[in-house]
Amino acid sequence: MKNISFLLIFFLLFNLSCISIKARMDCIEKQTILWKNEDIKYKIQNKLSEILNVWIDKDLKAIQYLKSNLWKVDESVYFNSQKDAAILLVLIQDTTKDVYQDNIQMVYGKIKNGKWHFFIYGMNNLIIERYYTGKKDPTIPYTFEELSNLGKRKLIEGGYLKKCGCKINDEWVNTWYSETLEGMHRDFLNNK
């Protein structure tokens, strides 16, 4: 009986020490505010916006959907602790008539040879169905702020922060990069 009581107390204390998704979203919000004062955050966001426009202008097939939609790079940048790799989100409002979904495209950023490189092809594209997410009027796209919060929640659930606290899970951020991602990116750049 003592062993069961001890295990029950341990289990309860362990679970109470973990913080909720909402509290972890607040952690990311605080981190975003902290990073707002750092040039690296703006540089990486501006660089990604620039490169997306270059890819659109080069007429790369896999990215042309951005031409017909409203999009922006999210304010939050999900760096690893060393700030040499990050997950960024491209928030996409689909304005096509009779389409009731928006998208959040994940992009991996990594410093290679002293420069930021971005990888979009092979990264997850989160489809946000307006009908199934409780949107009152599914004909109206989510706002960029709403998409940002949905993306933040998905990244937390996916593993960006360690389960019990606000510590960045570097392993989760860093393992997105692979030779396969690099190869898919080369294919993407050659696909007109």
Image (spheres, rainbow, N blue to C red):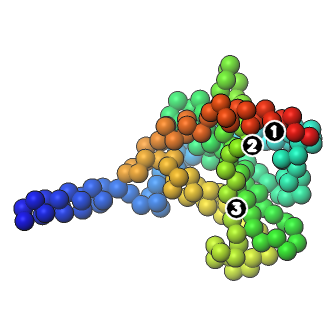
- Look at 62% across and 56% down and name the residue there: 151
- Residue 33 is situated, as x and y percent measured from the top left of the image, at 56, 46
The picture quadrant where one finds residue 129 is bottom right
Q: Does residue 171 appear to the left or right of 183 in the view shown?
A: left
Secondary structure type for disc 3: strand
- Give the residue furthest to the bottom: 136
- Residue 19 is situated, as x and y percent measured from the top left of the image, at 38, 57
Count of numbered circles in the view:
3
Q: Which residue is mark 2?
A: 121
Give the number of the mark in front: 3 or 1. Answer: 1
Q: Earlier in the sequence, mark 2 or mark 3?
A: 2
Label 3 near label 2: C-beta < 8 Å? no
Label 1 near label 2: C-beta < 8 Å? yes
- Residue 103 is situated, as x and y percent measured from the top left of the image, at 73, 59
Image quadrant in which the C terminus is located:
top right
- Mark seen at residue 188: 1
Q: Does residue 98 appear to the left or right of 147 in the view shown?
A: right
Q: Earlier in the sequence, mark 2 or mark 1?
A: 2
Label 2 to label 1: alpha-carbon separation: 6 Å
Secondary structure type for disc 2: loop
Q: Which residue is mark 3?
A: 127
- Look at 62% across and 47% down and name the residue there: 76
Q: Does residue 74 appear to the left or right of 30 in the view shown?
A: right
Question: Which amino acid lies under the numbered mark 2 shown in the image of this protein?
Answer: Tyr
- Mark seen at residue 124: none
Secondary structure type for disc 1: helix
- Look at 43% across and 43% down and name the residue there: 167
- Residue 37 is situated, as x and y percent measured from the top left of the image, at 60, 38
On screen, residue 33 above or below 174: below
Please tell me which residue lies in front, 6 or 31: 6
Label 2 to label 3: alpha-carbon separation: 15 Å
On screen, residue 38 above or below 66: above
